Image (cartoon, coloured by chain):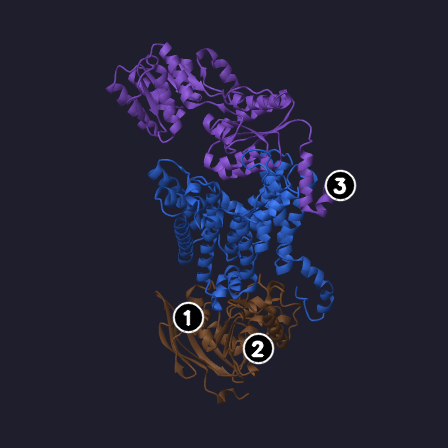
Chain colours: A blue, B brown, C purple
Amino acid sequence: MSSTGATVDERIKETSKLRKALIRPELGAIVGTIAVFLFFIIFAGDSGMFNAQGVMNWSTVSAQFVIIAVGACMLMIAGEFDLSVGSMIGFAGMSIAIFSVTLGWPVWFAILLTFAICIAIGALNGVIVVRTGLPSFIVTLAFLFILRGFTIFFPQLIERRTIIGGIAERAAGDWLAPVFGGKVGGFFFDWLASQGLIAVFERGTRAGEPIVNGIPMLIVWALGLMIVAHIVLTRTRFGNWVFAAGGDAQAARYVGVPVARVKILMFMFTAFCATVFATCQVMEFGSAGADRGLLKEFEAIIAVVIGGALLTGGYGSVIGAALGALIFGVVQQGLFFAGVESSLFRVFLGVILLFAVILNTYIRRIITGER
Amino acid sequence: MSSFDHNPIVEMRNIEKHFGPVIALNGVSFDIRPGECHCLLGDNGAGKSTFIKTMSGVHKPTRGDIFFEGQRMDFASPRDAMEAGIATVYQDLAMIPLMSVTRNFWMGREPIKRVGPFSFMDFSKANDVTMEEMRKMGINLRSPDQAVGTLSGGERQTVAIARAVYFGAKVLILDEPTSALGVRQTANVLATIDKVRKAGIGVVFITHNVRHAMAVGDRFTVLNRGKTLGTAQRGQITPEELQDLMAGGQELVALEGSLGGTV
Amino acid sequence: MKATLKTLAISAVAASAMMSGTAALAEGERYILVSHAPDSDSWWNTIKNGLALAGEQMDVTVEYRNPPTGDLADMARIIEQAAASNPNGIITTLADPDVLSGPISAAVDAGIDVIIINSGTPDQARALGALMYVGQPEYDAGFAAGQRAAGDGVTSFLCVNHYISSPSSTERCQGFADGLGIDLGNQMIDSGQDPSEIQNRVMAYLNANPDTDAVLTLGPTSADPTILALQQMGLAGDIYFGTFDLGGDIVQAIRDGVIQWGIDQQPFLQAYLPVIVLTNYHRFGVLPGNNINSGPGFVTADALDLVAELAGEYR
């Protein structure tokens, strides 16, 4: 390393363009994505996985992972974890259901209030972590239990059951609900169907309509969050502070980066993402259950780690995390199309995780000069 | 060197700092003038770290006064001290190795480019300035995207020093910048200190290595057990005398006796 | 395979159209069973085995899918995915109609035959356009049990309801009362879930109503403490005792003569029969005219050896 003098420069410059293009935090995730798609094209290419319905299926599942992975990624780069994401999803969904169905408030108000409450809880997570200096792992683990407990307790107390339905009827005609539960681009799919490019329903009330009739807002949210987070992280002053806060909080503080504020904001952003996830789910399915979002925090963290982020913070990529989420979603749904026994899903996932992390560590060492 | 014609930029008078029952600093006086390198020497635990943290606004002194350009100052935070022009380069906290040189260089003071209602970090400006400032310090970077972790220890210190100088530091505090470096890299850092001094910046060079201090120092102050043992000018003191002062002279002998020769 | 790769390279949309066409030409019927149970729930092993056996016997491809954590939203995705793979039929539970009715009716509309099993009701299955419902309608099971008890001379009973917030629990008690031909009245108690509370409430009720002929419990949660309560009161083996579902203590109590019968909803049939029904429907166009009740199957001391032998496998 000490030989990186002026004389070596010219020799390194020869390969720098290719290296620069290849050696990036997302490389592991890009390689993984290509490998996973090749695998499924070979083993499940004619199973329906790549027809319109199949594509929509794994895209939707992946989009769910993307939404929470983007939040988890930003927070992890800022040097913290949030294990309460899964419970937050259940809590937010139940909160919307109780406000709109049980209390009869307008759905838009229920959604906005839920966002406010959940982001406030995210801020509370952050404030506790920053003020006490406790590991975020422990603090958010506490909230994992607290939020899940409330998610079971309140509906049981009020409605004497743990699943609250009927939100779809309440949401009909609401102006905000379609932003989360709606679909866009229907005309395009109508056109595809009229050209015979995608299948149509053969019977029932929707006979003749295309089987896929639009892109769910879930996917739009996932893409939007990914793009915004990527730009903020790589192109703005705040993004630099996020890296700095996670890379070395003390060093960042010494040069005047408001580390506490950055971390708290990232906790709030993670909570925001979890609430988006929950709202989309509740608006699509029309009900909230106390067991929604179970283990989602780990799925988000796995996607982020596959995407090349460093568990200890200061390094990572939103695009990588989104690709990690795509890998996760495609594998989870694709194994089914490939006819693999579903209990082997975890084996497959473990292998991918291990492979990706080893590759990522290797790449990161090249980039950052770690030894 | 005409450093003594100037008034001090920073003057610390009878600084005391207590942490509960522990007295870390017990009446330390120190000053730094433009264009000089003032070496602060002392063994581990002598109070060097506490002292520079007091100077850079991390700690508030329990007693004593800090004057900045003749005015009495109370720094509420490192940010205040930094804005006044006191920059500190910490031994191990100088840089974030995972981040690129540019990101490190501009950390906390990123240049902004506005596009409509949005403000972005101006990377083309940031990269150009970083490359240029590093070139001035004698380091040719492969690319401004290069992670700091790929630089050698001496180069990292140089990035931190170049950053402080670029952002208008009047006083540069270097906390043991040479302690973990090899011979060649130490020479590079000492050469950088010399460049900075010639630019009219006051350098506070903390070290426990007398040879490094003698190489660039204009004045030498020795700290021992929370007290200054006096300030000497270049040429008025030999390396051996400095070494003795740092070790605590008579005190060490007395201590040795009381512990029954176990030290 | 080569063709697939090539097509994909040209256009994903065109490829998808092509493949949805080829899928229908696949040989051998393919059926997918989707359950709501998490991986950890061993009760569903019986379902898996029943499914595999039916697939083997009918020479069709069968697949079992479930959300690993039991998350019903994930289950909805699995049903959508099952529909996308264009199988001949989908067999699914209806654990939460709000969440699942959308994907299920979309599958039905896409031309896939669906049978609802286990959770849900015949009415809900009909509303979604499913071919039939295979399971144990709770009211009917209670009613059959009531008729059986009436035949044994029972005229009054205590229903120990440990899950009063669930409508199906109440239906079991109501059916039992109707089967006996008596009014349910206040013969159903809300016992809660705590074993010692259940035990004490049963004792309190039986002390207050000494002429009670029979006890009905709704599963191991309420049956096990009730067995203890009866033993303490010296009524074990004396009072008529029936229960829903089976469990270790229940089987032992049946063997000891404390419990007269246990109602088994026979999950094996819930997986096995739909495959048989769907295959014959697709091959010969024949379909039973009504829903199929997989239960109640009454387990008494006589049939206990077979149950014990096959427990966890087919029973």
Q: Is residue C154 above or below residue C192?
A: above
Q: Which residue shows up at 59% across the image and 67% down it?
A: B101
Dot 3 surroundings within 10 Å: few (below 14), some, or many (20 or more)?
Answer: few
Residue B77: numbered disc: 1
**Label 3 with label 1: CB-CB less than 8 Å:** no
Residue A368 is at least partly visible in this image = yes
Q: Amino acid at mark 2?
A: Ile
Let me know if marks 3 and 2 both belong to one chain: no
Q: Which residue is mark 2?
A: B193
The C terminus of chain A: image quadrant: bottom right
Left/right placement of residue B213 relative to residue A8 reads left
Q: Which residue shows up at 64% across the image and 71% down it?
A: B184
Residue C2: numbered disc: 3
Dot in front, 3 or 1: 3
Q: Is residue C105 above or below residue B78?
A: above
**Chain that bears disc 3:** C
Q: Amino acid at mark 3?
A: Lys
Q: Amino acid at mark 1?
A: Ser
Left/right placement of residue A148 relative to residue A296 reads left
Give x and y (percent) for residue A237: 52, 66
Give x and y (percent) for residue C55: 62, 24
Q: Quadrant of residue B23?
A: bottom left
Dot 2 surroundings within 10 Å: few (below 14), some, or many (20 or more)?
Answer: many
Helix, strand or loop under label 3: helix
The N terminus of chain A: image quadrant: bottom right
Left/right placement of residue B149 relative to residue A130 reads right
Helix, strand or loop under label 2: helix
Left/right placement of residue C216 relative to residue A183 reads left
Q: Is residue A333 above or below residue C253?
A: below
**Chain that bears disc 2:** B
Residue A69 is at least partly visible in this image = no
Outermost residue, left direction? C208
